[in-house]
Structures are given as C-alpha cells and as structure tokens.
Image (cartoon, rainbow, N blue to C red):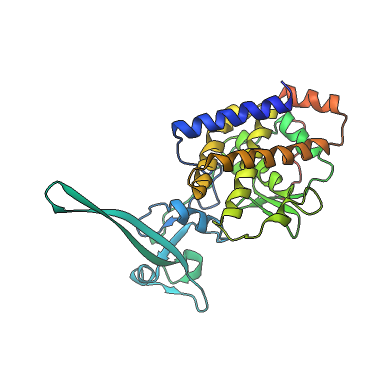
C-alpha cells in the first residue's frame, strides 16, 4: 500500500468512527503530579478546564479557590494570579405538567495552583505519583524522526507536549511517563506536524490569523496536527494502538465547527502535505526508508532522539 492509499484508508476509518461515536480523549502520559484536579474534592477537571489547566507549567496538579485555600489555613502568595475555570450544567424544571424547561447554568471560578500558595499542611495534600515504564524505541517511528533532515529541536522531560514556533522546538514529556511506547510517538508526531507549518518549511502558520486558544484557526491547526499524526502512525504500523485516541482528539476539536465534515476534509489535505514534507526530507534513500516503514518493529539498540533527561 503506498502512502496515498494509506491516507485514504486512515481518513475513512476516522470518519466512520466519528459517525459512530467515540470515547473521550485520554492524555497518554502521566504528568509528574498527575491530572489537574481540585485539592479539596480530588475531582479531575474536564472539558475546556482540562485544556486550560494542562497548558500551565505548574509542577503540582492541585488547584483550589481562594476560599478553599483559606479553609486549609493557607494563603495565596503575594503577587500570584488566579486562573479562571468554568462550571456549567443543564437545569431542568417543570413549569407545566408534562413540560420540562431546560435552562443552561453557567458559573465561573478563579483557582490557584498549590504551588501558588503557602501554609497548607502537607498532610492535607494527597500523594501523586508519575507513571514510569521501560521505554523501547520503535524502529519505524524512530527512523522517520531521526532521518528527517530539517527536523526541529526536540527537548524531552517537560510536563506537557507542545511546539514553540519562535524557537522551532518541540517539547515532550519524558518517554517513560507514557503509558505505551506507541502513544509517545503519536504525541511526538502531532507536535512535529505542527512544526511543518513553520515559515522555513511549508509556511502554513503564516496563513493563521487568530492564534488564540479555542479559535477556529487554532482548532483547524489542531485537526491538521492530529490527522497528520494518525497518518504517520499508520505509515509506521502503530495505528492499532493509537487510532482510537487520535479520533477522540479530533472529535474534541471538530466540535468547534459544529461537526462540519468539510473541515475534516480540509484538515486531511493539509495533513497530507505536512506528512509528505516530512517524508520528502528524509536523509536516507527512499528504498531504505521504505524498509524502515514496513518493518515496524522495536529497535532497542537505537538511541533516543535528543535526550534531555
């Protein structure tokens, strides 16, 4: 199967799963302290709150309102700023017999990370452990990345995965914090597809007008990156372990466009160009690259891409 046939197969699989319903997206690695959650209730934040909090660089996963901090005899450090989170649900009331009125209820809260506070008794803080497993590089996936001639710098050991355009750098969590090796590469592929939009490569980012989180331009770029990651996972034969989460992530962003299928088609076209760029800029001959792609087996002797541990 050539890469163009594979693009079509993966796209069709994604569309079919989107139409049948998908499970919520799951972050495939464990932060040093775990998922963002409220210290008092120990409930994880979800929806837009998850995305807002996971993007912050605090080392603790715990958040509290000002009153919750005070209830634990703590204080917010001078000069620290809060982060807004949103709570909403649908309230139902029966105004007339048999007629149910549904009213959206929305409330905003300002929360502080545990590291922004002081004076809280450590016995009140639940233990949190990072996931740790023996990471084994996967030959096909490793070859595509390590042989990409103008690959951006990759720094490992962060608490989040992201691409920084002005530094042309991809930051990634430690490989050992991922639940599965395949998920590590899927996440890395996502960020590397982002990097293809740099002005020194395809220049896709220059056409983005609104870089604000949650905007349609931002959402479109996320769709491109995840579609591209799905294609690269298919090319390296690890998609059987990653496709469900790829689709769940795509579903979370396509809602911005009211599930408009045309948006997915556009993202797929841009993702193909991004992946083609990566494959067209390999530093090994095409026939050798093809051998790497078709084998898809772990290559434990190959070193990590750019260790920064």
Q: In the image, is residue 297 above or below residue 80?
A: above
Q: Position of residue 213 (x, y in %)?
A: 56, 58
Please identify the quadrant where the N terminus is shown: top right
Check the image and name the residue furthest to the bottom: 78
The image quadrant of residue 233 is top right
In this view, 10 is above or below 271: above
Q: Up-down: is 8 above or below 34?
A: above
In the image, what residue occupies the spot 11% across and 49% down? Answer: 97
Q: Position of residue 67 (x, y in %)?
A: 35, 71
Of all residues shown, which one is farthest toward the top? Answer: 1
Task: Please count the marks in the image.
Answer: 0
Q: Is residue 11 left or right of residue 117?
A: right
Whether residue 236 is visible: no
Measured as percent of width and height from the top left, residue 126 is found at 41, 55
Task: Name the residue rendered at 66%, 49% in the picture.
Answer: 172
- Residue 217, how many percent across, how many down? 61, 54
The foreground one among 129 and 306 is 306
Say if residue 220 shows up in the picture.
Answer: yes
Q: In the image shown, does 131 or 269 lie closer to the viewer?
A: 269
The single residue placed furthest to the left in the displayed view is 97
Q: Is residue 176 left or right of residue 1?
A: left
The residue shown at (54%, 32%) is 15
């Amino acid at each position: 199967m050539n890469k163009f046939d594979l693009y079509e197969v993966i796209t069709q699989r994604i569309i079919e799963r989107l139409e049948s319903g998908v499970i919520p997206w799951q972050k495939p690695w464990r932060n040093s302290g775990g998922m963002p959650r409220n210290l008092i209730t120990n409930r994880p934040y979800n929806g837009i709150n998850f995305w807002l909090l996971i993007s912050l660089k605090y080392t603790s996963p715990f958040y509290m309102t000002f009153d919750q901090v005070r209830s634990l005899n703590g204080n917010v450090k001078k000069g620290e700023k809060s982060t807004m989170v949103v709570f909403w649900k649908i309230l139902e009331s029966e105004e007339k017999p048999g007629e149910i009125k549904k009213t959206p209820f929305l409330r905003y809260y300002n929360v502080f990370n545990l590291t922004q506070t002081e004076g809280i008794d450590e016995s009140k803080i639940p233990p949190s452990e990072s996931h740790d497993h023996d990471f084994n590089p996967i030959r096909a996936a490793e070859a595509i990345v390590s042989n990409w001639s103008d690959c951006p710098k990759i720094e490992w050991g962060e608490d989040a995965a992201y691409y920084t355009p002005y530094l042309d750098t991809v930051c990634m969590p430690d490989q050992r914090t991922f639940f599965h090796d395949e998920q590590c590469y899927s996440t890395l592929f996502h960020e590397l597809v982002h990097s293809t939009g740099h002005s020194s490569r395809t220049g896709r980012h220059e056409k983005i007008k609104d870089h604000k989180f949650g905007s349609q331009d931002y959402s479109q770029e996320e769709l491109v990156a995840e579609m591209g990651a799905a294609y690269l996972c298919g090319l390296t034969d690890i998609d059987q372990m990653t496709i469900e989460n790829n689709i769940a992530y795509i579903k979370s962003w396509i809602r911005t466009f009211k599930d408009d299928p045309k948006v997915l088609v556009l993202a797929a076209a841009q993702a193909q160009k991004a992946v083609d760029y990566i494959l067209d800029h390999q530093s090994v001959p095409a026939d050798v690259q093809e051998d790497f792609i078709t084998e898809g087996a772990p290559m434990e002797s190959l070193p990590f891409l750019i260790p920064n541990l």
